[in-house]
Image: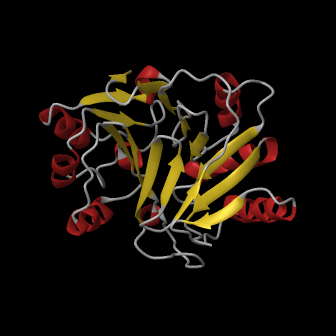
Amino acid sequence: MALANFYLWGAVFHLDGNLHILFFDIGQGDAIFIETPEGHQILIDGGPSKKILEKLMKEMPFWDRTIDLVILSHPEKDHLKGLLHVLNRYKVENVLWTGVLRDTEVFREWQKLLNQEKKREYAREFIAKAGQEIKGGDAKIFILYPFQNLSGKKYKNSNDTSVIAYLIFGKKSFLFTGDATKKTEEKLLEEKFDINSDVLKISHHGSKTSTSKEFLKEVSPEIAVISCGRNNRYGHPDGEVLNRLKKFGIKILRTDQKGDIKVVSNGNDLIY
């Protein structure tokens, strides 16, 4: 099912010529909503609960029940569970994910819903692999990781199978890293990809297992967004990561402090 590229065709609603990216305050998890200047709607992950529906209803017109593309970075509960509610409520046109297997109740429900959607001819399924390009008008998303097709492979911990996506709009770029650890960051650096980005979604909620000094130096972002829950039991974000970001002079935006974080771009500038 993996394709070199595919196009998004969505309905056009409230357009202002800008790219809108919202990092939802979803608790201890990830959920990122993207709306392109042409009105294409993309959701990366759904967080750990039904709260994603409340967030989407505030951003989408009440009569809009279609999402062009859902990207599941990796099938862990804090990224996946909310997508079960999304599939039940919205018509999702396309789903991009790795196809890796997990032995959890949440994952089994995910597989069940995907199969149901296929029977209704919804949620066309694509397996993520480096080299794919997603075109949503003037905004383009390039899949940088995983390097191989991982469909059908089993993992006890799927963090390092995370889909890593690089979005370019005009002169601005955004890097979404899922929960990838330093191990995967090193692999990206070895491939010598151009990952210089204006906005970096910090991996794994600011865990010390991610966001190495070498990786930050290569990405060199203006803004780092950390999605994490208030007073979470993991201690995210880690103090070492925060200090590292500060040493690089990177502006830190955290959902546990600021709530929903919106970044808007006209292709030349960022507003946040």
Which residue is at the far right?
Answer: 120
Residue 258 vs 42, above or below: the answer is above
Q: Does residue 200 appear in the picture of this structure?
A: no
Image spot of residue 112 (x, y percent): 79, 64
Please give the name of the residue rendered at 40% of the width and 26% of the height, measured from the top-left corner: 266
- Tell me what residue is drawn at x 40 percent, y 27 percent: 265
Q: Is residue 218 left or right of residue 47?
A: left
Residue at 64% x, 22% y is 14
In percent of width and height, residue 53 lies at: 71, 34
Q: Residue at x 39, y 51 (%)?
A: 177
Is 145 situated above or below 13?
A: below
Quadrant where the image shows the C terminus: top left
Q: Residue 74: x and y, percent?
A: 53, 59
What quarter of the picture does the N terminus occupy? bottom right
Q: How many marks?
A: 0
Residue in front for this viewpoint, 7 or 99: 7
Closest to the observer, 113 or 130: 130
Q: In the figure, is residue 238 to the left or right of 4?
A: left
